[in-house]
Image (spheres, grey):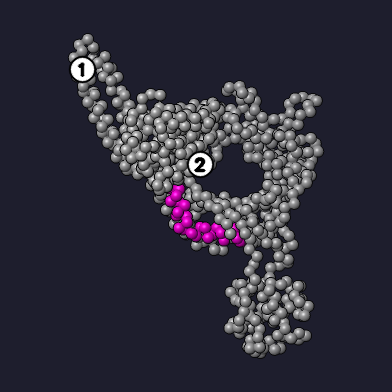
Amino acid sequence: MGQSVISAIDVARRVEAPTLRAVDYLRVSTEEQKKGYGIAYTGKKTSKYILGKGWKHVGTYSDEGVSGALEAHEREDLSRLMEDARQTPRPFDIVIVHEGRAIGRTGRAFWLWVWELKKLGIYVGVAKKDYDNSTPEGESKMRKDADYAEDERNIIRERTQGGLQEKAEDGGYTGGNVAYGYRVLNKGVKGESRLIVDECNCGDGCVIKHEADCLRRARTLYVQKRNWNDVALALNAEGYRRRDGALWGRGGIRQQVLNPVVLEARQIYRGSAHVKRDRAGAPINGDSVVISLPEIFTSEEIKELKSAQRVLSRTSSLGNVYPLSGRIPSDCGALYVGGGHEGRQRVYRCKGKEGKVAGASVCSCGYIHAEPVEKETWNLLREFLGDVEQLKAMADDWLGVGSGQRVNFDDHIKELDQQIKVQTRALNMTRAVTAKELAGQEELSEAEAEEELEKAVAPLQLELANLRKKKKDVEDWKAEAESAHDRTSKLLQLAEMAHKRLGKPSAQMQADFMSMLDVKVTVLYAPAPPKGKSCTLAEWFRKNKREVPTITDSGWAKVEGLLASKGRKHSPRLLLESILHKARTGTPWQDLPSSFPPFQTLATTWTRWRDSGLWEQVMDALAGEEGAPVPAEPAAKIRLECSIVPDLILESEGRLGELAPRGWQHQATFKFQAVLTS
C-alpha cells in the first residue's frame, strides 16, 4: 500500500478522539459479479483497510447487483446509510468504499451523496487508492476517479448500444424475447441472425407442431367458435402446445393470436414508453427502429379475426364498468376481474376460475361484492388526494433525496470557480516560464519549441477542462433540482383542483384514475352481497340524513290525522311501526316478526306512501321525536397501493404544456408511492 496523504480528519481525530468510527459501503454491479468481484470480495478489502488504519468498524451497507448509475435514493442500502448519517449525533465519521466506481458511475450518482455526507461532517475514503476527500489532494483524486468511472461507463454503453442500434437498423435480431410464432434464424452468427416465421417447411412426414401453424389454426377456430376456451381445448386435443410445452388456456392463446407483433408483422426496437431520454427528449441510447417481420396472417385473415372480435363485444352482456378489474389479487395467485353477477348484485370474480389450461380444475375463490369495495377504494383515494400536506411532505422527501436539495449547489459552484481561477493562474504561469526557458534553447526549431510547450502544459489544461466540465454539470444539476421543485409545486396545485372534481365521478372516470395511479387493492374484508335489491327505505333515511323515529303516544298524536284513514285491514299505527322497525334494524322484509302484517303488505304500503308524498309529511311531523340512525352499510376493509406520477396527472387534465417548465419532457418523470389502509 502506497504512502497516503495525512488527511484533516486524521489530524483532527488525533486531538479530539482516539478512534474514528468507520462504515464500509459495498456495491457491485451484475457484470462485476459475473467476473467474480462479489460483495464478500470487496468487503474483505474494505475491512482490512479500516483495520489497518486503526479505525473502529461500526457497520456495513451493501447493494449487490446494483447499477452505479442509480442515485443514492434508488439504491436500497445506500439510502439507509444516508438516513442513518442524518441522525444526531451522527453514528459514524467516515464511509469507506473499495474503489471509486463503487461510489457511482455518473456524476450525479457519484457526487450528490458524497457532498451531503461532507456537509454532515462525514467523509468518504477509497481503500484501493488509499485516499479520502478531507483534503484538497484527496478531492482531486476523487474527481479523477469520478471522471474515469463515467468515461468507462460511456465507452461500454456506446459500444454495446451502438452495435445493437446498427443491427436493428439492418432488421437483425437484437436479443430479448421472441414473439410466439417466430424463431431466430442463424442465432449466434454475428451479423446474420434475424427473425423468421416458425412454420412447417419440412416437407411430407413432419411431426413438429410449429408455432405459426398453431396461431393460424387458432385464428381459424376462433372465427368459427367465437370462444377462446373452445379454441384452447381444440388445440390441446390436436397436439399443439405452448413454447414451454404446457397446455393452452383461453387467456394464453388469445394473447398470442392478438399480439400486436403478430398482427402488425413488425417489432419496435426501443419503442417502449420507458426508453431513457435526455433533458431535450432525445433517446440516450439511440433512436427507435421499426423492424419489419414476415407476415403470419394475411390482411384478409386479420380483418376476419377483428370482425369476429367486434361481433362478440356487441353481444356481450357485460355492460357495466368495473374500475378495479385486474387490480385485486386473489388467494390463488390470479386477479379478480369484473363482469359477474350474483343474484342482482355486481361482483368481481377470480380469473383462477377459468383455469390456466382449458378443461383443467378451477380455483375456489369466492366472489367479491363490487359496490362496497369500489366505494371504500374511492373514498381512500379521494382522502389521499385531498390531503395536500401529506402530498407535499412526500414531494419534499423525493426532492430532498432525488434531486439533491440537501446539497448546496451554489457552494460547490463557488468552490469550483475558485479552483478554476487557481488552475488558470497556474497554467498561465507554467506557460510563461516554460516558454521563456524554451526560447533560450537555440537548438530547437520554432515548431519543436511549441510542441514542447504544449507537452509541458497539457496536464494542467486537462485538469482545467475537467474543472470547467464539473462546474457545468453542477449548474445543470442545480437547474434540474429547481425544475423538479417547480413541477412538484404545480402538481400539488393540480391535486387540489382535481380533488374538487372527484365527488361523484362516473365509473369510467374511476377506472381511468385507477389506471393512472397504478392502483392495487388487497381486500382485507368484503361484506357479502345483500339478498335482492338494496333497501330503498334505508336509502331514504340516509339520503335525507334523518334518524328513524320511535313512535310514542305523543308522536302518534302528531301523525294520527294523516294516517287515520290509511289503514284498512291493519292498524295504521301498526303499519307505521312495522315499517320503522324494518328501517331501524335493517331486517329484510321477509324476515320481519310474524306479529307484523305480511311483508308484501308492508312493502306495498311503504312504496305507496313514498310515491304519494305522504311518507315525507309523516316524517316531517315526527322530526322532533327521539330516533336512531339506520344501520350503516357494510363497509369493506382494504389495503390500497398507488403511485402518484406527476406528468400523467398533468396530462389527464390537459395542462401538461401549461404547467410544466419549458424544455421539460414527458419522460423526465418521478413518482410518489403511497400505501393506504381503511
Report the span colored magenta.
375-399
Image quadrant assignment for residue 265: top right
Q: Report, in whole angstroms, how far the alpha carbon at label 2 lies from the one at label 1.
A: 57 Å
In the rendered view, would you say 267 is above or below 384? above
The answer to whether 564 is drawn above or below residue 414 in the figure is: below
383 with respect to 210 (left or right): left
| Numbered tag placed on residue 437 in the rendering | 1
Q: What residue type is labelled 2?
A: Glu
Q: Which of pointers 2 and 1 indicates the residue nearer the eye? A: 2
- Residue 654 among those drawn in magenta: no
Question: At x 48% / y 46%, what residue is drawn?
Answer: 670
Q: Give the residue type that dot 1 points to.
A: Glu
Most distant residue in the front direction:
18
The C terminus sits in image quarter: bottom right
Q: Which residue is denoted by mark 2 in the rendering?
A: 76
Residue 469 visible (yes or no): no
Report x, y in % for residue 513: 56, 54
Q: Earlier in the sequence, mark 2 or mark 1?
A: 2
Can residue 622 be seen here? yes
Q: Does the magenta stretch include residue 381?
A: yes
Q: Is residue 427 left or right of residue 308?
A: left
Q: Is residue 660 left or right of residue 238?
A: left
Give the residue displayed 28% in from the left and 34% down from the top: 419
**How many C-alpha atoms fall within 10 Å of the one at disc 2: few (<14), some, or many (≥20)?**
some
Q: How crowded is mark 1: few (under 14 residues within 10 Å), some or many (20 or more)?
A: few
Q: Is mark 1 on a helix, strand or loop?
A: helix
Disc 2 and disc 1 in contact, CB within 8 angstroms: no
Which of 207/217 is in front? 207
